[in-house]
Image (tube, helix red, strand yellow):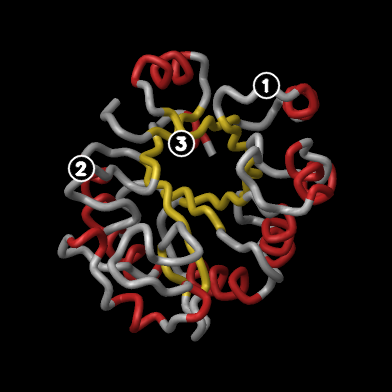
Amino acid sequence: MNWLNKIPIAHRGLHDLEVPENSLGAFKSAIDLNYIIELDVRLTKDRKVVVFHDIETSRLVDRNLKINEANLNELEELSLKGSSFKIPSLKTVLEFVNGRVPLLIEVKNETNVGALENELVKILDGYKGEFALQSFNPLSLKYISRVRPDFKIGLLVGSFSKSKLPLLKKIFLKYMLLTPYLRPDFFSIEYGVNIWMQKSMLKIYNDRPILYWTIKNKEIASELIKKGHGVIFEGFKI
């Protein structure tokens, strides 16, 4: 697990205006500079694991499809931000990266756990490179840890200020109340959020690595790295 807080982590790959996020181009740029690649995975209608952040495609492509209502072959035909890069499957990304740098995989599951997690485990069972999994959904992580106890899991935590979750769910996530149940291997914390309960939990589990997201200032990133923290960064090169 040393690599988590030793190597800078490129948020959705090293992307810019010409190279879209979560694309093979962004991943190549990250590999060229030896950064860890952070990426997002979702489940399609035909139960394939695709690399994409949003619930629907409208922000990144000209056509609007919900990921869980589209088949993988439909999504793979879409060009990202008018570029030549396509929406890739996780299998395609793993074949491309091929263990050259570690992967930090965010599991995007806002619904029932099981289907995505099972498919993800099947795919990662055959991967020889280093990886860790993280999610805002502690139930998703718990499911994975039960199926594969050797997989490293990290709890994503933030302010949830823009979240549309029901109040009770938001409280449980914001104050990390399921941490004793989950017992994650590391934490990914939203930088700049000052919540006393989060600080208390991090003190209790102070033997776990802490990553901070999403850092968009080079000086802040450098200071966090000097303190021994992991940094998920975007918009510059370290």
Using the image, determine if residue 227 lies above or below residue 184. above
- Horizontal side of residue 17 vs 48, given as left or right: left
- Horizontal side of residue 207 vs 81, given as left or right: right
Position of residue 58 measured from the top left corner of the image (x, y, whole percent): 38, 64
Residue at which label 1 appears: 194
Q: Are marks 1 and 2 in contact (CB under 8 Å)?
A: no
Mark sitting on residue 3: 3
Dot 2 crowding, Cα within 10 Å, few <14, some 14–19, many 20+: few
- Residue drawn at point x = 56 percent, y = 52 percent: 133
Dot 1 crowding, Cα within 10 Å, few <14, some 14–19, many 20+: few
- Which label's residue is closer to the chain start, 2 or 3? 3
Q: Quadrant of residue 9?
A: top left
Position of residue 184 measured from the top left corner of the image (x, y, whole percent): 70, 44
**Which residue is at the front of the view, 106 or 58?**
58
Tag 3 secondary structure: helix
Mark 3 vs mark 1: in front: 1
Mark 1 vs mark 2: in front: 1
Using the image, determine if residue 169 lies above or below residue 121. above
Residue at which label 2 appears: 32
Q: Quadrant of residue 172?
A: top right
Q: Are marks 2 and 3 in contact (CB under 8 Å)?
A: no
Amino acid at pointer 1: Asn
Which corner quadrant holds the C terminus?
top left
Amino acid at pointer 3: Trp
